[in-house]
Amino acid sequence: MPQINEAHRKSVGPLEMPPRLLLGPGPSNAHPAVLQALGLRQVGHLDPSFLNMMSEVQELLRYAWQTENRITIPVSATGSAAMEATIANIIEPGEVMLIGNMGYFGNRLEDMASRYQADVRTIKKPWGEVFSLDELKAAMEEHRPKVLALVHAETSTGARQPFEGVGDLCKQYDCLLIADTVTSLGGVPLFIDEWGIDLAYSCSQKGLSCPPGASPFTMSDRALEKLSKREGKVPNWYLDMSLVGKYWGAERTYHHTAPINMNYAIREALRLIAQEGLEARWARHQSTAELMWEGLEAMGLEMHVPKEFRLPTLTTVRVPAGVDAKAVTSKMLNDYNIEIGNGLGELGGKVWRIGLMGFNSRPENVVTLLAAMERVLAEVGYKK
Ligand SMILES: Cc1ncc(COP(=O)(O)O)c(C=O)c1O
């Protein structure tokens, strides 16, 4: 039997964590009402009250995503699992999947698609840029894919990929469209049905201001039809929507034990979105981000992405010459309890990533961030 030191066993105290302001690429701080919901008393996962609540989660999620898709659910895992669910359900071995890769999460899509034996084709953009409709059309013509996947909000670069017209293009080529909306849902205008998106996934820990662990997933009737005509089984039992869909559908048949309290939490997060209203919420994210961009520019800093394609939820700020990027993020965390992110992949050491997502997208957080940044930059020797 593994032993624990007797004195230590008795002295282990309750868990305490530092009061961080999470202004990195995610997670964002959960809304206090969401944390309260998380602590509500449990019921069983097949209890009538829980089954009713599941319907509310679906209805609220359809609103947040602007879709009428029947299969609109939170996957019981983080965003990467919801991402994998889109590919696992829709790709059959040997089918051509085209990936618009403009950053780190495009790489992840490529990796996942290859594991499901897709014939993966990619088009690439320098990190910080996005694809034009003409570029996408040329790639569709060349590759004739069964599925096109694009990242709406690339968290590694801070770029927003426009989707207007992409759904129509896909229909023209009889292709299904996957959208990664992990850093856009709940913060950036997003219209699943109007844009003709067939499969989308997201996470709970960014624009929804909920802890990580319940990840939105949706699929259209077109996507469901392809799923129903598969030759083989979905090669991932846990994420097979023909099974999971029965738990979230009219049957409510047991599939796995839903993380009960996480569903309370995401219901509360989605309720807060409905209460605020999508348009007001998108406008709040935009105006808070603009306040921050102005403040950073006044300090002589440059944003990496042109304003037209810049995400309000995640900003990449260029690290000025001679400044040690990691020294700044460490000081922000250790001296001011503020988390901001370092650059990822190709942008490592070149940018900081600052998130203003969901509950955290408020002017007082911008003022706190700017004041701390100014002091920390001066301490590491930066002069405007
Ligand atoms: C654009 C994008 N896609 C996918 C993911 C994966 O989500 P998770 O870390 O919740 O598994 C992330 C996480 O940051 C992301 O930013």
Image (cartoon, rainbow, N blue to C red):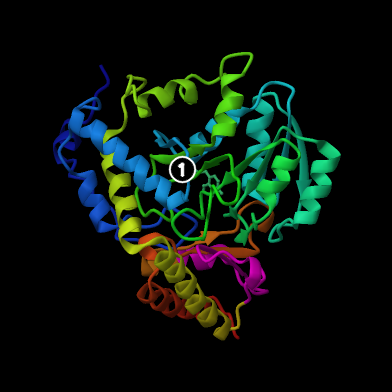
**Amino acid type of the residue tagged 1 in the rendering:** Glu
Residue 81 versus residue 68 in the image, above or below: above
Where are the magenta residues, as a range?
A: 302-331
Tell which residue pokes out farthest to the top in this image.
232
Q: Report the front residue among 128 and 282.
A: 282
Q: Report the front residue among 98 and 341.
A: 98
Q: Name the residue at 38% across, 64% down.
A: 360
Q: Secondary structure at mark 1?
A: loop
- Please give left or right for residue 358 compared with residue 98 in the image: left
- Residue 14 is drawn in which quadrant? top left
Residue 231 versus residue 32 in the image, above or below: above
Q: Mark 1 = which residue? A: 68
Q: Position of residue 20 (x, y in %)?
A: 34, 61
Residue 205 showing in the rendered view: no
Q: Name the residue at 44% across, 20% down.
A: 243
Determine if the magenta segment contains residue 323: yes
Q: Position of residue 342 (x, y in %)?
A: 55, 59
Q: Name the residue at 37% across, 62% down.
A: 277
Q: Report the front residue among 372 and 77.
A: 77
Residue 69 versus residue 151 in the image, above or below: above
- Please give left or right for residue 64 compared with residue 341 in the image: left
